[in-house]
Image (tube, rainbow, N blue to C red):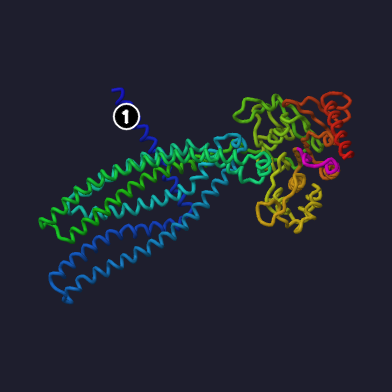
Amino acid sequence: MLRIDKVGSSFQTKLHKAIAQLSYFPQTLRLLWSAARNWTIAWAILLVIQGLIPVAIVYLTRQVVNSLVAVTGAGLAWESLQQILFPTALLVGVLLLTSSLSSAIEWVRTAQAEYVEDYINTAINQKSIEVDLSVYESSEYYDYLNRALSNASSSSLALLENTGSLFQNSITLFSMAAVLIPYGLWLPAVLVVSAFPAFYMVSYFNRRYHHWWQKSTTDRRRLQYYQMLMTNNQVASELRLFNLGSSFQATYRQLRRQLRAERLKLIAIQSLGSLLASITGLIMVGLAMAWTVRQVLQGQMTLGDLALFFQAFNQGQNLLRSLLGSLGKIYRNSLFVSNLFAFLRLEPQIVDPPQPQPTPAKIQQGICFRNVSFAYPNSDRHVLKDFNLTIPAGKIVAIVGDNGAGKSTLVKLLCRFYDPSSGKIELDGINLRDFAVEKLRRLITVLFQFPITYQLTAAENIALGDLSANPSTDNIEMAAKGAGAHEIIDRLPKKYDALLGKYFPGGTDLSGGEWQRIALARAFLRRAQMIILDEPTSAMDPWAEFDWLERFRTLANGRTAVVITHRFTLAMRADIIHVMRFGEIVESGTHNELIARGGFYAQSWKTQMEATQDSALENALV
């Protein structure tokens, strides 16, 4: 009894899972309707017409055969020939219509595919923009994204096509059943039963294939990663210097062999199962056909009836097999489309409060971190623990410290890419959580530690800093001059219209320091009240750094500025310097005050200056 209960429970579980997966079917239809409504209506009308054509062909074939039998017995008199010409002409007309409809349906389906693909890709892109930065800390997100991108459009379109096939075949099948019923109610029943073995095998292997696809997502992403390593220009130098190509290629091939073997094994088992199911169905059909031949031999059916039966029964079986196959494919594609809806269900946690506070027209007091603790997602290590810091309005504040001290984390918290685990961050005495996210971020402009090298023109690269303001050419040039990028751009053949980077034809690549100045110009273009610069001169030489510092103080012009750096020659010019170690502020003051204390800052300053002097001496001797 216990075993029976377990089997029943297992069956119910599978049934519930199947029903749950098929619940995505109406969601997908709504999505397809939203993406291509007019094309879907045209497609449905054409399918109805195409669904009725096979029945017309079967019926007209019966008429032609019976007319031929009559003509054979009556001779070639004109009256006799007229009996065959009319049904034959109709049959030819229907066959011509079939060809025309196939072309029309293909055109409509292609148009649908274009609209649906655009709609789905736009939805995926929009969701990728909306989700929190924290999701990028999880490998599960990349699995979600990979599944959505890999199957969303193709599975949705396949679901559309299979639904159309189901719709069309249902119309034809019901019509065929009406044709067969006069010869015996048991004939349609044989059709249904003969197709069920194939349907079961399709459904079973669809589940197995989807399970394998889900399980192999990480391996497939790893495969894509190694291919990227072998084809990406940023990796090309190390790839050749350290002779990594053969190792990466070997890993890539091993993963391909593994995935290929797993997939081919599934397909081989599926093919064997489908063969056995087809043989079972054919035996049932063969018995029904033997009965029909017997009826003809006994004179209980005409040759026209025999032709009708063979066509109707053969097409009916194919239709039912196709119909059940479409159901199986709908189930399979619903499994894959579920990946899309799972991705689209991701919701950001960084959201606007119910009643946002207005952002200040001008920052009056500044920023204050109060007992802030923070750990990144999926990590137990606190980057900040009971952290306190004040950034006065209108001052240039430098934050220095070793790598891993938590400096860049401050930028992410200030921009509300993350929220503190505990404590709060205040702007003019108001918690950052109480502001609308977009309006808060409009107050801030940032140069991130690793700026993006957009493969666009120089002007477009800078304009990205404030697209909402539709910046003029003068504003773009002013920002470039403030960042020291104007001289670089002015040397380019097309100046501000020059395409940067080598991704597209005709582009000009820049050095690391030059790209950094372009990114600085992008940050400076936004006339935000707070400027945050994360390692702004890391790719500059000391002479370029000194020149840039003079520009920056003029550009800041009373705005609140936070400069995160490990270069003390940059930090020393700030109004206030905070020294971070292990997620805490250990020293604060001006450069002279910190030197006088003889603490960590003073020791680090001395070490860095000695290293700089040794480097300068070495350069002088070369």
Q: Nearer the viewer, residue 530 or 242?
A: 242
Q: Nearer the viewer, residue 506 or 18?
A: 506
Residue 71 at x, y = what percent? Answer: 16, 70
Is 272 inside the magenta-drawn segment? no
Residue 119 at x, y = what percent? Answer: 52, 51
Q: Nearer the viewer, residue 340 or 291?
A: 291
Picture layout, residue 403 above or below residue 91: above
259 lies left or right of 97: right
Q: Quadrant of residue 299?
A: bottom left
Query: Is residue 557 visible to us here?
Result: no
SS category of the residue bearing label 1: helix
Residue 326 at x, y = what percent? Answer: 36, 48
Is 543 inside the magenta-drawn segment? yes
168 lies left or right of 213: left
Query: Is residue 158 visible to us here?
Result: yes
Picture residue at 85% right of the left edge, 29% below the top: 605
Question: How many discs mark residues in the rendered view?
Answer: 1
The amino acid sitting under disc 1 is Gly
Q: Quadrant of the C terminus?
A: top right
Residue 226 at x, y = what percent? Answer: 58, 41
Q: Quadrant of the N terminus?
A: top left
Furthest residue toward left: 298
Badge 1 density bin: few <14, some 14–19, many ≥20, Cα 10 Å:
few
Q: Quadrant of residue 393?
A: top right
- The residue that disc 1 covers is 8
Q: Which residues are drawn in magenta? A: 535-546
153 lies left or right of 197: right
71 lies left or right of 125: left
Picture residue at 38% right of the left edge, 41% below the top: 268
